[in-house]
Amino acid sequence: MRYIAVAIAIAAGLMVLIGYFVPALAGVQSVLLNWAIILAGVAALVGVFNLISVHGDKVRRREKGSIYSAILLISLFASFIFGIALGPDNPNMRLLVSIVIVPVETTLMALLSVTLLYASIRLLRRRTDLMSIVFLLSAVLMLVASATLPFGEISPLNDLVRPWIQQVLALGGARGILIGVALGTLTTGLRVLFGADRPYGGN
Amino acid sequence: MSPDLIAGFIAFLFTLFIFSYLIGDNPLFRIAVYIFVGVSAGYVGAVAFRQVILPDLFVPLLAGKALLIVPLILGALLLTKVSPRLTQLGMPTIALLVGVSAAIAVGGAVTGTLLPQIGATIELFNTRSAVLSAQFFGMIFNGAWILAGVITTLVYFHFGAHTTRDGAVRRFGLIELIAFIGSIFLAITLGVLFAGVYSAALTALIDRFHFVGTLFGLH
């Protein structure tokens, strides 16, 4: 099974990669991409079934906090069954999203404003080095420059300093990070395509 | 009580339950989070089935596209991942997904990030559009800063090192110096990103206050 898995990964990967450069293989690439999309959908279902299995076990064993698992299972089955029966675009499903998912996500994001502020204060108290100070200074500068203050905006800060930091200094750093990430992705991807890394369990 | 008011009240309860985390982890917060995870997982499962598996697999298969028998078999094998005893059977499907994803990642990294970002950095020194000499020097000045940021940030992530006589592992002196400058660029970049995330979080906080205010007719 391991050898089959390695052969499938390398063959499928190389065909998709070559398909970018050789037009004759574009058809095969398209078929493989379509299969991958379908299988990603099945993988999402496997994830849901795994969640049901883990929390189902907790409820069966009456572990501590199993009441929360029961609540999770009830809400999961309700939204899954209604979602399958009605379709995700149904107005009732949209209502479910707008009364559960949207408020919880937005409030978690709102909580972030408190936790980030707390984390910044802790950073200053625990690690007062040059990097931390530059980090917090640039963050505060950006916030002050973009904020609508009671006495109006601070003109040179908003018109000169902020754009220069954002569009020159931060752009250079961000571009360096992006190129670094792309180089890392390229290396990891090539290692998988040549069979050196086998994250699917083909070792 | 109108359905809109009931929906608004339920959304308000979820908002309140999540905000209760400010006083520490508590049952109300947990109930809200577990319901959120359950509803989201169910919704994702329904979307995956109704908008991917059904239209891209079952409908064309029933219409006579025999080639789709392959993803059907691979999908069935992937479902065995749920059982610890049969988990090995799903390996070929995971291998196909990993292989295709790696190829997409390689293609995306080269054509979507590396070439455009390097091209944009080179383009900074294209002074043909500069009419005045001040514009010319401005472009060169900013371009040099950006180029310095790109190079020093990349050097910061270079971890090649040598062993010194006292046994310590250190980077070369020049690399260490360039990496230090890179760390300043990184700190500024992360600070700017942090400010962006913090602004988004504050916007979400204001949105929640506005929602509660609207629900109770405070504005």
Image (cartoon, rainbow, N blue to C red):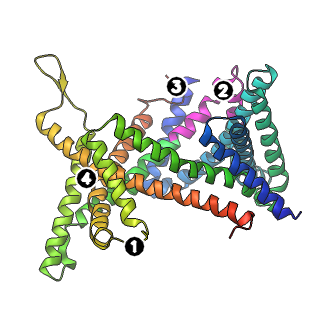
Residue A109: give x, y in percent of width and height.
57, 51
Query: What type is the residue that disc 1 sits on?
Result: Phe
Q: Quadrant of residue A168?
A: bottom left
Q: Position of residue A44 (x, y in %)?
A: 67, 42
| Element type where label 3 sits in the image | loop
Q: Of residues B103 and B126, which is closer to you in this image? A: B126
Give the mark nearer the N terminus: 2 vs 4: 2
The residue identified by callout 3 is A202
**Segment colored magenta:** B76-99
- Residue pointed to by mark 4: B150
* Image label count: 4
Tell me which amino acid carries mark 3: Gly
Check contact, mark 4 vs mark 1: CB within 8 A.
no
In front: label 4 or label 3: 4
Rendered position, B218 above or below B60: below
Query: Camera-side residue: A195 or B162?
Result: B162
**Mark 2 vs mark 4: in front:** 4
Where does label 2 land, which residue? B89
| Mark 1 surroundings: few (<14), some (14-19) or many (≥20) residues within 10 A | few
The residues bearing labels 3 and 1 have C-alpha atoms spaced at a distance of: 64 Å
Answer with mark 3 or mark 1, whichever residue precedes in sequence. Answer: 1
Q: Residue furthest right?
A: B1
Callout 2: helix, strand or loop? Answer: helix
- What is the magenta segment's predominant secondary structure? helix
Amino acid, disc 4: Val
What residue would you read off at disc 1?
Answer: A151
| Residue drawn where x is 10% and y is 18% of the image | B165
Q: Is residue B153 left or right of residue A95?
A: left
Residue B55 belongs to magenta span: no
Horizontally, residue B194 falls left or right of residue B186, namely right
